Amino acid sequence: MMRSWSARGTWGAALLGYTRFVQCGLSIVAAFENDPAKVDTRIRDKAVLPIERLPELARRMHVHIGIITVPPEAAQRVADLMVEGGIRAIWNFAPVRLVLPPASFFTTKTCTARWPACHGSWQSC
């Protein structure tokens, strides 16, 4: 089973609760946050951890996919932490182009649609 991570936000909370990922062999195991008031809480029964721990935990848990759901100004920092942790693919929901290492195994997908535009279904995104 692949594991992926979410960083934070409304998109992050929605993705944490999306149960159909399991059908694709994906499991979101935690969220990361830079707001101390949100760290050590739970969203949809997933732990919210300090963003600084992302590289260490991603390496230790052999995470392959990272999901970025942060404001544009924070996306590059989160991507850098993911790369540092050995994450091999990034699904980017921030409306910004990320600068990633030139290795061919990095994939960034950007979705700028908003949840209502998806009509409540990820299939229509």
Image: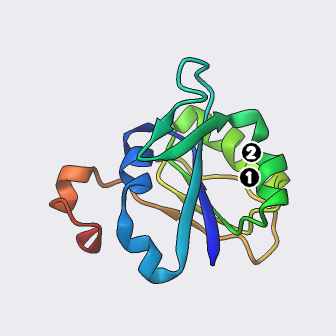
Can you identify the residue that label 2 sits on? 54
Residue extending furthest front? 45
Q: Residue at x 77, y 39 (%)?
A: 53
Give the mark nearest the N terminus, 2 or 1.
Answer: 2
Label 2 SS: helix
Query: Label 2 vs label 1: CA separation?
Result: 7 Å
Left or right: where does residue 29 sit relative to residue 110?
A: right
Q: Quadrant of the C terminus?
A: bottom left
In this rendered view, identify the residue nearer to me: 79 or 9: 9
Residue pictured at 71% horizontal, 70% vertical: 106
Q: Where residue 33 is drawn, which disc sits there?
A: none
Closer to the camera in the image, 109 or 82:
82
Which label sits in the foreground, 2 or 1? 2
Query: The residue under label 2 is which amino acid type?
Result: Leu
> Which quadrant of the figure has residue 89?
bottom right
Quadrant in the rendering for residue 77: top right
Q: Position of residue 48 (x, y in %)?
A: 58, 37
Residue indicated by mark 1? 82
- In the image, residue 57 lies at what x, y percent? 78, 50
Residue 65 spot, x, y in % from top left: 64, 66
Q: Amino acid at mark 1?
A: Met
The residue sitting at the left extreme is: 119
Q: Quadrant of the N terminus?
A: bottom right
- Contact (CB < 8 A) between labels 2 and 1? yes
Q: Residues within 10 Å of mark 1 (few under 14, many from 20)?
A: many
Q: Residue at x 74, y 69 (%)?
A: 88
Front residue of 69 and 20: 20
**Residue at 15% across, 60% down:** 119
- Coloring basis for residues: rainbow
Task: Note whether 56 is above or below 20 in the view shown.
Answer: above
Residue 74 horizontal side relative to residue 11, left or right:
right
Question: Could you tell whether 63 is left or right of 5 in the image?
Answer: right
